[in-house]
Image: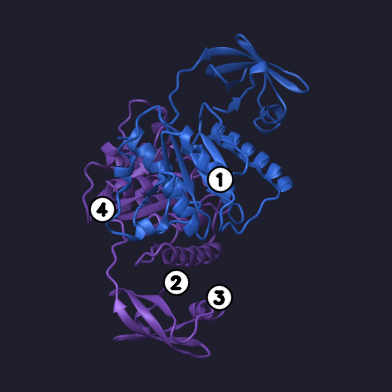
Chain colours: A blue, B purple
Amino acid sequence: MQRYFVDQECWNDNTLYVNGEDTHHIVRVMRMREGDNLVAIHPEKGPALCKITKVAQDDVHCCVVKWMEEDRELPVRVTIVASLGKGDKLEQIVQKGTELGASVFIPYQADRSVAKWDNKKAVKKIERLQKISKEASEQSERTVVPEVQSVHSLHQLLEMKTHYDHCFFGYADEARQQKSESLSESFQPLKRGQTVLVAFGPEGGFSEGEVEKLSNEGFKSIRLGPRILRMETAPLYFLSSLSYMLEEF
Amino acid sequence: MQRYFVDQECWNDNTLYVNGEDTHHIVRVMRMREGDNLVAIHPEKGPALCKITKVAQDDVHCCVVKWMEEDRELPVRVTIVASLGKGDKLEQIVQKGTELGASVFIPYQADRSVAKWDNKKAVKKIERLQKISKEASEQSERTVVPEVQSVHSLHQLLEMKTHYDHCFFGYADEARQQKSESLSESFQPLKRGQTVLVAFGPEGGFSEGEVEKLSNEGFKSIRLGPRILRMETAPLYFLSSLSYMLEEF
């Protein structure tokens, strides 16, 4: 069933209205009418099965049929730090990373990032990534929309260390070494409810300077299987494996 | 180091030549010269570190410096059956599925496939997918290029059952059920060296008829975490989890 994230101010106990682009989607794209059902997600109370009571010009009014109990969120909060890449790589990471359960995305201006975002471009890009994350949350039936934060520098990234229980970074050379620590060994200390930050390099990988600084600050380098993954595939391997370990084991 | 898959007929003991598009890549894109090193992969003997001995008009001659011992292939042979989808979804599945270790890709004309390929289109599409698979194999440092087969019907798909040790299909409703079998339980009977076939539906999922026929023929439906994944994300979750279980555990 179609799902919509509805801001707190649109709710009044067991009634709510949907406005903005979602109205367009409900009325024009889905062609829903009075009496039809949809799932509306309250920012705190979570998802509710709702019935449309009135379709007006600019908004759609609904009432709650029943509050739903769902457990769709990864049991650890994962922040994906994604280096700026060429083309639509960040869009792919945010879209598919949202489906796979990430909680936060942070674009990172890496030493070897070929793509550069000036301030004006960054604002637009982040707005677009936030929209992709909302749509992917609806599509994948999540109960939370991941947040897309502003572009971070290495200095800012290193400072985040203190806010997380575990910090990792993807490092292609780990795949080339037979004897490095396996990913499951790296996952060993993770406990439900904890926070994880994981940083991925751009097309050319992290620079030696970045690897040194990340390592010195206690970020742990991880293996993602024995093959060399593209920058946009690595976060998906990480999230899939984490979901497999915590949700499918 | 740059890698190239070189056909059997281009090898003569410890010397070889590279021709066609790879010559262009070596000379124009990578700007390599006599004395430079590259990795050439023999279809049977695997990868060898090679030195360029001569750059000619249409081909590049090399000699083997040493044969390399690498173990980059998933320990089970996985065939991904991917339903025809809109846009570049199959390209994404083949590119990233190759990085993640799949052995064979089979496009499938599903009941709900919005995209249709006529014979002429199919030939071109498969040629393009095969090229993507070769490039992704080189990039991810694999020693085998996955094969892209012709478009299969449901009848052909069901008949393949006898050639595989395990047959699965992705089914979104499994994600919605709290009590279905976990993916690790489905993976339990898998042993190294075995063959696995896994089929994924198009945007709208498999039809009821398809689910019934697949189930009746002994294809097992699998969960891929509790969230609903897009058609192009589901195979990546499957392959990542399988790699995690067999290569990183």
Q: Chain of mark 3?
A: B
Select label 1 or label 2 by which is in front: 1
Disc ID at residue B2: 2
Give neighbour class at mark 2: few <14, some 14-19, many 20+ (Cα, 10 Å). Answer: few
Left or right, residue B244 beside residue B148: left
Quarter of the figure with residue A112:
bottom right
Quarter of the figure with residue B11:
bottom left
Front residue (pair B235, B64): B64
Q: Which residue is mark 1?
A: A155
Select label 1 or label 3 by which is in front: 1
Residue in view at x 44 percent, y 28 percent: A72
Q: Badges 4 and 1: C-beta atoms under 8 Å apart?
A: no
Give neighbour class at mark 1: few <14, some 14-19, many 20+ (Cα, 10 Å). Answer: few
Q: CA distance from mark 2 to mark 4?
A: 39 Å
Give neighbour class at mark 4: few <14, some 14-19, many 20+ (Cα, 10 Å). Answer: few
Q: Chain of mark 4?
A: B
Total tally of numbered discs in the picture:
4
Give neighbour class at mark 3: few <14, some 14-19, many 20+ (Cα, 10 Å). Answer: few
Residue in view at x 39 percent, y 59 percent: A173
Q: Which residue is mark 3?
A: B29
Q: Secondary structure at mark 2?
A: loop
Left or right, residue B104 beside residue B122: left
